[in-house]
Amino acid sequence: MGEKLVTVFGGSGFLGRHVVRRLAKDGWRILVAVRYPTKAYFLPPDGDVGQIAILKADIRKDAEVAAAVARADAVINLVGILKPGGGQGFDDVHDEGATRIATLAAGAGVKRLVHISSIGADPESKSEYARTKAAGEAGVRGAFKGATVLRPSVVFGPEDQFFNRFASLMRMSPIAFPQFGGGKSKFQPVYVGDLARAVSAALDSDAAIGRTYELGGPVVYSFKELLQFIATTTERSPLFIPIPYFLLNVGAALTGWIPGAPITYDQAKLLRIDNIVKNGPDASTVGTLADLGVEPTAVEAVVPSYLWTYRPTGQYAEARGA
């Protein structure tokens, strides 16, 4: 265990648990700053005794954020939401919260800051999620000179909110399944373990100071291809029905506000946008996983290991192939 201390905001989430585990393996002392400490109590066993500590820190409160970064050598901000809730809106988290962390980290003399944004972050986007992600990037850049910004594509792994969600929906609708916009939107899913390695690499690389990276997997898929992959993996054969985007928007507007709704109106807007590496206005300057020394993992190598739970007979499905 080294002497360097890194504060990780949002360390108890899907991405956070993988980042904390990676940092512990790489020898960092880690302070996990979370809104609800009880949800992070599972993390300390991922490191040596005393290597991982938990601290309550709400990114909307200056005093709590300041206490979390006070003695840190590096700070990582992983906090993000897919839809507003729990007293937090997109602006609170993606813009104001991110800027607050960067500002107070700079004031505390923190040497390195890694900020997680998203591919598609755009101040002109019709999606509030994408607009606030772009605003957060600008706020971080303005407050912390030398911050590293990572923009992942759709992140996959055992607890993901993409493959699991569509597999669950397909289980509820096994006969017919909507294919929004003809399934033409493109995605470049990145494995959560690769993203965690990229975060750790960015902390240790001088070349990453002040740079932006867009992180995607080795293959670009259409939405149609991903839905077919999910169906094949879960051993289902629904009839895919092309649905125009305007009908998706209507449905999402009517039901997206309901807790547990499969898709919100804002998420419906995001489905129209290609979510692939080097597709934005700064494509010529952004780095990739390769620039951070990380070899991307294929969807096919990981996703079947957890989507089997959505098969008609689950783990007891009869073995296929050799």
Image (cartoon, rainbow, N blue to C red):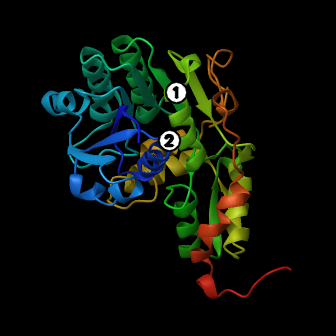
In terms of depth relative to the viewer, which is nearer, 88 or 178? 88
Residue visible at 59% across and 17% down?
207
In terms of depth relative to the viewer, which is nearer, 320 or 297? 297
The quarter of the rendered structure image containing the N terminus is top left
Q: Secondary structure at mark 1?
A: helix
Residue visible at 32% across and 21% down?
102
Q: Secondary structure at mark 2?
A: loop
- Numbered mark located on residue 298 in the image: none
Near mark 2 (Cα within 10 A), the count class, few <14, some 14-19 or many ≥20, is: some
Q: Which residue carries the number 2 mark?
A: 26
In-image side of 125 versus 234 (left or right): left
Q: Which residue carries the number 1 mark?
A: 204
Task: Name which residue type carries label 2.
Answer: Asp
Considering only order in the chain, which callout, 2 or 1, is on the residue closer to the N terminus?
2
Image position of 294 with respect to 236: above or below: above
Q: Is residue 79 visible?
A: no
Task: Name which residue type carries label 1.
Answer: Asp
1 and 2 marks in contact (CB < 8 Å)? yes
Tell me where residue 132 sits by quadrant.
Answer: top left
Farthest right residue?
Answer: 322
